[in-house]
Amino acid sequence: MADSSVYRSLIGSLLYLTATRPDLMYSASLLSRFMQSPSKINFRAAKRVLKYVRGTTHLGIWFKSNAKEDSTSLIELKGYSDSDWGGSADDMKSTSGYCFCFNSGVFSWNSKKQDIVAQSTAEAEYVSAALAANQAIWLRKLLADLGQKQLRPTNIHCDNMSAIAIAKNPIQHGKTKHIKIKYYSIKEAKKNGDVSLLHCKSEDQLANIFTKCLPKNKFEELRSKLGVSNINLKEEC
């Protein structure tokens, strides 16, 4: 068994970096699940992530200005929500991931294991969308305080039609009655005009990077779409 104190310190450092590096969010969140009794495999995985960090110190979130837009125009918030299904081998719980973007860069993101065992992919996706909706409501209030009040519902893109159907259905039917009441807040958020769930193709789902391990090419593609790029390049904003 690895030294747990060293492991906790290492993971703490990785979690600190996730404040500005969304591409580290899933791996840091996953490794943080083993803080109490890390194995040598966990330790090797953490060191591998550190090697990745060392080789990508030039990366950061790049926000580009849009010269075509009036400087006084409002910035529109756009969200993405995704989930795996039963990805945790220990307890078969799913991992939720979401992110919110402004123009070219990601503004808010998270990756977290769900606190229930989802009985279907639709349920896992619905829970993730509910968590994203709660974050959207908070971000909308924050933006309003900064003079960027959102005049339209915040679009949250989900790649599961069944999850969207559950959120749109005002009636709690038999297949969803076991879902915790707190996740039904998304229905109220939709009713109040705070959020709107939209379907997107799986290949366009940016939040996929927060829910599972991905092949290198797909990982780098999504990382780029989140606005994570070489901040050392001299480029006009």
Image (tube, rainbow, N blue to C red):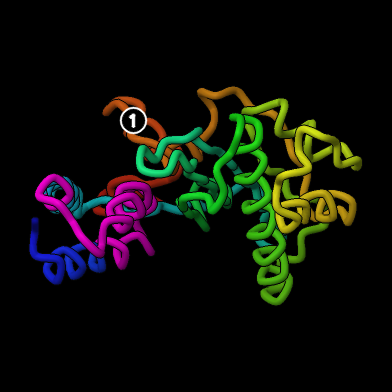
In the figure, is residue 41 to the left or right of 21? left
The answer to whether residue 56 is seen in the rendering is: yes
Left or right: 128 in relation to 216: right
In the image, the segment drawn in magenta is: 14-43
Residue nearest the viewer, comparing 77 with 230: 77
Question: What secondary structure is the stretch in magenta mostly built from?
Answer: helix
Percent coordinates x, y for residue 218 in the rendering? 36, 27
Mark count:
1
SS label for mark 1: loop
Q: Is residue 121 placed above or below 183 in the rendered structure?
A: above
Give yes or no for residue 71 being in the magenta stretch. no
Looking at the image, can residue 70 be seen? Answer: no
Question: Residue 201's quadrant in the figure?
Answer: top right
Residue indicated by mark 1: 214
Q: Indicate whether 54 appears above or below 160.
A: below
Rendered location of residue 199, percent (x, y)? 69, 29
Q: Residue at x 45, y 37 (%)?
A: 225
